[in-house]
Image (cartoon, helix red, strand yellow):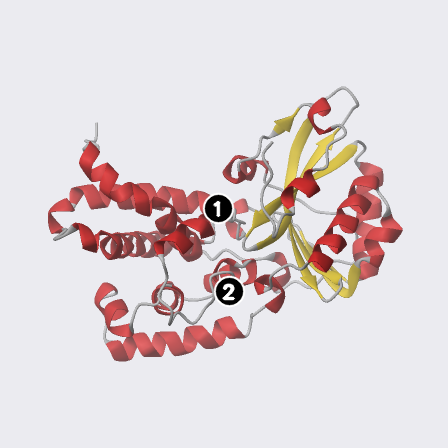
Amino acid sequence: MAVGPDESFRVLLEPHRREITLHCYRMLGSLQDAEEMVQESLLRAWQRRDELRSEGAVRAWLYKIATNACLDQLLKARRRRGLPHWGAVGPSHSTRLGPPADERYWVEPAPDTLLEAEASAGQRPDARVSQRESVGLAFIAALQLLSPKQRAALLLVDVLGWVPQEAAALLQSSVVSINSLLQRARKSVESRRDDSSARTLSSADAALLRRFMRAWEGGDLDTLAALLADDALLSMPPQPEWFAGREAIRQFFATVWSAVPGRRRLVPVGANGGPAFALYRQPAPDSPHEAVAITLVAVRGARVAQLTRFAFPRLFPLFGLPTQIPGEELEGTDPFAAAWADGWRSPAL
């Protein structure tokens, strides 16, 4: 049996766990993979605890260990997570879905609680990427298109605010090589920039999202479609199919809602720096609401521009949400009202 760290060492590392988890999530595109890498990093830290020269250096030391653990994992896995609408296959013209793809092919969402840990740790003011943008789904997905070392260099310098010399030391490279990695990485990420994921929600956005939520729950196709942008996108990992345009999305919802009976309830959550809904379905009046999917919503102007629906019920506990809710607990409640208070936050259920 492996020997665990003693209590004093655990207390020293524990305050950094969540920000290291966020760093690993950015590197790997999966919160579950990130948590596994954090466990691996803490084990490596225990095994190499004699290298730590002072308590003041523990944060940078942990970032070094975690970055190298992620690089090892990426080289071993030899696959890149992505999003369906970024693939080579164009939008679907049929509402009939094929078999889902392997879940390991897709970027996954993460709760906003991870952002709070990094904010409290304090970022350098010269970081090029804003905190909200740095956890946006578009940014996370764009990172996965980079080589592992490009990914690491961009995160260390542009997100965490390290200077290139520090990144070069961690990655055992030259400053010239780091600057070259950064130049290519920035160009690639810039081409995928999505301004909607970095915006702060206004009261008008909140009103739009509330109408959208009510239309979804009530099966009101006309209202839901009217709230979509003309060029709206709907993707649904692990399904490889995706839909482009208001009418295509309307037809998809019409097909699904008629084929899958039951009552739908949406619970607002904060995901990847923006609004999202946790979808529950109650198959019969006396049955509990079952977790179905977490859907991230991007707003542009006065319309919903993008829906990314992750049909992974296993993610619900990571967002602090149950996978089942007794039917009576949602009767007469307004979870949206609890979520909107000077911003967007997850409700307590």
Q: Quadrant of residue 165?
A: bottom left
Distance of label 1 from label 2 (alpha carbons) = 22 Å
- Image location (x, y in percent) of residue 203: 70, 57
- Image location (x, y in percent) of residue 78: 40, 56
Q: Nearer the viewer, mark 1 or mark 2?
A: 1
- Image location (x, y in percent) of residue 42: 26, 43
Figure check: 106 above or below 262 = below
Look at the image and tell me in which quarter the C terminus lies: top right
Amino acid tagged 2: Ala
**Pointer 1: what residue?**
113
- Image location (x, y in percent) of residue 194: 59, 68
| Marked residue nearer the N-terminal end (1 or 2) | 1
Residue at (40% x, 49% y) in the render: 117
Residue with the most extreme right position: 222
Look at the image and tell me in which quarter the N terminus lies: top left
Dot 1 falls on a residue whose secondary structure is: helix
Amino acid tagged 1: Thr
Residue at (76% x, 62% y) in the render: 303
Side of 124 relative to 95 (left or right): left
Q: Which mark is residue 142?
A: 2
Residue 244 in view (yes/no): yes
Q: Quadrant of residue 231?
A: bottom right
Q: Which mark is residue 189?
A: none
Q: Quadrant of residue 234?
A: bottom right
Dot 2 falls on a residue whose secondary structure is: helix
Residue at (32% x, 47% y) in the render: 16
Depth check, front residue: 268 or 37 = 268
Counting other residues with Cα less than 10 Å from the Cα at mark 2, is it few (<14), some (14-19), or many (20 or more)? many
Counting other residues with Cα less than 10 Å from the Cα at mark 1, is it few (<14), some (14-19), or many (20 or more)? some
